[in-house]
Image (spheres, rainbow, N blue to C red):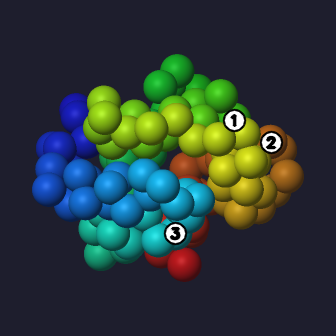
């Protein structure tokens, strides 16, 4: 499954363009890309696409490349953006984002 099976390509492109020269804000990105309106089931499908190694978690290394999961044209997150994203989503403090933590962040 690819991200364009779940989200509209033009919304992905627009959301990526919004953060070309700005600090990445995951909550704003998820809203721009149309994820806030998605069902929990579809948000979990997005999570599975982003969970590159299939571990059931998005680890810090995967998080750095999260925008590439939406489009090959997505940029890498900076180290500070990656850390801020992880800190905002990792509610149990285990150093990775679980599927439930991801869903909560998208729908906050």
Choose between 96 and 83: the one closer to the eye. Answer: 83
Local secondary structure at mark 1: helix
Q: Which residue is mark 2?
A: 95
Residue 2 image offset from top left, x and y in percent: 23, 34
Going from N to C along the chain, the mark reached first, 2 or 3, is 3
Residue 34 image offset from top left, x and y in percent: 28, 68
In the shown orientation, is residue 91 left or right of residue 24? right
Q: Which residue is mark 3?
A: 27
Say if mark 2 contacts mark 1, CB within 8 Å. yes
Q: From mark 2 to mark 1, how far is it between C-alphas?
A: 7 Å
Choose between 85 and 37: the one closer to the eye. Answer: 85
**Residue sitting at x 25%, y 60%:** 14
Local secondary structure at mark 3: helix
Q: From mark 3 to mark 1, how far is it between C-alphas?
A: 17 Å
Local secondary structure at mark 2: loop
**Residue sitting at x 54%, y 78%:** 108
Q: Which residue is mark 1?
A: 60
């Amino acid at each position: 499954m690819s991200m364009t099976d779940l989200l509209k390509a033009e919304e992905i492109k627009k959301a990526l363009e919004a953060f070309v020269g700005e600090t990445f804000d995951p909550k704003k990105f998820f809203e721009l890309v149309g994820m806030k309106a998605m069902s929990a089931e579809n948000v979990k499908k997005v999570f599975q696409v982003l969970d590159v190694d299939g571990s059931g978690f998005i680890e810090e290394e995967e998080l750095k490349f999260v925008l590439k999961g939406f489009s090959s044209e997505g940029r890498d997150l900076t180290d500070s953006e990656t850390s801020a994203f992880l800190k905002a989503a990792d509610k149990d403090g285990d150093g990775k984002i679980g599927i439930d933590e991801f869903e909560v962040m998208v729908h906050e």
